[in-house]
Amino acid sequence: MNKEKKIESLGYLLEAASKIFGEKKLLEMLVAEGAPEDKNIKEISNDDRLRFLHLTMALKNSDIFLEHLRTRLKEMSEISKILDVGNHKVIEKWLSDECKPCLIEHVVEGYDEIYSILTELDDRLLWHGWPLIGRLHDPIK
């Protein structure tokens, strides 16, 4: 995974976890797993020393985070299946794994699958002509 994609992925996961636990608690959890100290969430997501392993270890035992992640993945899989976008079977396989903490590892390792589904959904649902339609309704803008 290239550096830009790593930062983007970590930033997304850190933001979601921060909403669940609060920034202070999340930082404590990360530091307990060996992440760099004395930073806020924005700074730590750009720190080269931060690894997915730190976040995975900090969150993999959190039932709250895992349930949120499971719900989002299930929804993504269902939409993907209905619209025949991406490979929903990969996500279904992750969700069928009995190892709850492994779900985070599946997402981190298989982020390309998620990204592929999201970009396909974006291309299909958020048609590039929408800004033009908006201008037709309100040509001043």
Image (spheres, rainbow, N blue to C red):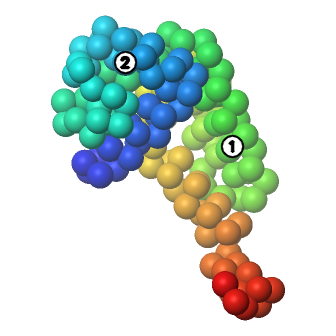
Label 1 to label 2: alpha-carbon separation: 31 Å
116 displayed left or right of 123: left
Q: Secondary structure at mark 1?
A: helix
CA neighbours of label 2 inside 10 A, class few (<14), some (14 to 19), many (20+) = many
Upstream in sequence: badge 1 or badge 2: 2
Disc on res. 27? 2
Q: Residue at x 44, y 49 (%)?
A: 112
Q: Residue at x 53, y 32 (%)?
A: 16
Farthest residue, direction left: 49
For the C terminus, the quadrant is bottom right
Q: Secondary structure at mark 2?
A: helix
Q: Residue at x 53, y 18 (%)?
A: 21
Residue 99 visible? The answer is: no
Please name the amino acid that badge 2 sits on: Leu
Above or below, 127 relative to 132: above
Above or below, 131 relative to 70: below
| Residue 28 drawn at (x, y percent) | 36, 12
| Residue 127 drawn at (x, y percent) | 68, 75
Q: Nearer the viewer, residue 10 or 92?
A: 10
Please name the amino acid that badge 1 sits on: Ser
Q: Residue at x 25, y 48 (%)?
A: 3
| Residue 6 drawn at (x, y percent) | 32, 43
CA neighbours of label 1 inside 10 A, class few (<14), some (14 to 19), many (20+) = many
Q: Nearer the viewer, residue 51 or 95?
A: 51
Residue 80 visible? The answer is: yes
Tell me whether circle 1 and circle 2 mark residues in contact (CB < 8 Å): no
Q: Nearer the viewer, residue 101 or 11?
A: 11
52 displayed left or right of 100: left
81 displayed left or right of 103: right
Look at discs 1 and 2 and give the one toward the viewer: 2
Mark 1 — residue? 77
